[in-house]
């Protein structure tokens, strides 16, 4: 796939508003079938670093704000389905002339990591930092940012499919990330992809973050990826969220396990 990217045009094109996109996403794991019979359902995974795509698994390293410790059970690999990885390679090829490339934080994720953050870490963080939340409100907040672990063949968590990826853009020659206005895994409204579309722009930093989130959004969209509207860094191809947001009848990828 050859991509032609209009980066200046992308910087001036707003990200779609959060509300309608998030409403479309609701119930995606329970109401979106997966085509288990297709050839792509059994497609292999590849570590994208072997294809020249840069990245460092954020949960594997202790240099990982807001955690600052390696998460037990985390893996070093950045596995994605072959077709998904190929699209990232194509994006990098189109970005190269602009001295940019993708940088991955996470890809396929073990269920132990999903369970740790969904069931323990984030609920505990909310109890400490937002004690005013009721049990129901706390559950809703957890679900907004951390998908529940896989619930059988018909309801895999996005990162269990090999189709979901967390990433950003960086300048290739100096390995410096573009400023996005917030850290990876900032589980507040700041993480919403359109945060700088609905916030007052008061500084050069705000404008830079707005432009760069737009750039990432439209670059990934051009390659067929869908964005999780609650997380500027989360994109997917072929999973149930992608199918729902892209108006596909069925998802392509069920859960997979590249470490078997």
Image (cartoon, rainbow, N blue to C red):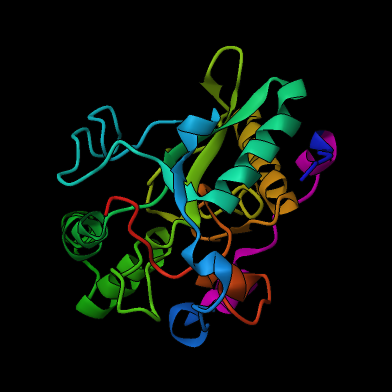
Q: Is residue 14 above or below residue 213?
A: below
Quadrant showing the C terminus:
bottom left
Does the rendering let one see residue 41? yes
Residue found 26% across the figure and 80% down from its top: 136
Corner quadrant of residue 250: bottom right
Q: Residue furthest bottom?
A: 31
Q: Which residues are magenta?
A: 8-26
Q: Is residue 145 above or below residue 137?
A: above
Q: Where is residue 123 shown, x and y percent of the image?
A: 20, 62
Count of number-bearing discs = 0
Task: Name the side, left or right, on which 255 lies relative to 128.
Answer: right
Q: Where is residue 200 shown, x and y percent of the image?
A: 64, 46
Residue found 52% across the figure and 84% down from its top: 33
Residue found 46% across the figure and 54% down from its top: 44
Q: Where is residue 156 shown, x and y percent of the image?
A: 37, 71
Task: Name the side, left or right, on which 201 lies relative to 188.
Answer: right
Closest to the observer: 247 or 206?
A: 247
Q: Residue furthest front?
A: 39
Q: Is residue 131 magenta?
A: no
Does the rendering let one see residue 180? no
Residue found 61% across the figure and 36% down from its top: 209
Task: Name the side, left or right, on which 129 lies relative to 82.
Answer: left
Task: Name the side, left or right, on which 227 lies relative to 44.
Answer: right
């Amino acid at each position: 796939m050859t991509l032609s990217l209009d980066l200046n045009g992308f910087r001036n094109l707003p990200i779609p508003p959060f509300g309608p996109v998030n409403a479309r996403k609701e119930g995606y794991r329970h109401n979106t079938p997966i085509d288990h019979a297709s050839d792509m359902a059994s497609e292999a995974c590849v570590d994208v670093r072997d294809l020249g795509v840069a990245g460092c698994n954020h949960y594997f390293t202790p240099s990982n704000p807001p955690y600052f410790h390696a998460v037990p059970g985390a893996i070093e690999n950045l596995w994605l389905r072959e077709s998904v990885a190929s699209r990232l390679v194509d994006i990098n090829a189109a970005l190269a002339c602009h001295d940019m490339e993708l940088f991955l934080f996470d890809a396929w994720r073990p269920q132990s990591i999903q369970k740790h953050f969904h069931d323990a870490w984030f609920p505990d963080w909310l109890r400490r930092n937002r004690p005013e939340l009721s049990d129901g409100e706390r559950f809703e907040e957890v679900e907004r940012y951390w998908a529940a672990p896989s619930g059988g063949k018909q309801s895999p968590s996005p990162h269990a499919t090999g189709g979901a990826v967390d990433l950003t853009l960086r300048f290739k020659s100096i390995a410096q990330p573009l400023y996005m206005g917030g850290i990876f895994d900032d589980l507040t409204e700041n993480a919403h992809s359109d945060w700088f579309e609905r916030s007052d722009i008061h500084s050069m930093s705000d404008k830079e973050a707005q432009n760069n989130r737009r750039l990432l959004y439209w670059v990934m969209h051009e390659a067929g990826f869908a964005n999780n509207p609650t997380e500027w860094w989360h994109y997917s191809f072929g999973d149930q969220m992608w199918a729902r947001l892209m108006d596909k009848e069925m998802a392509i990828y069920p859960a997979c396990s590249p470490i078997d």
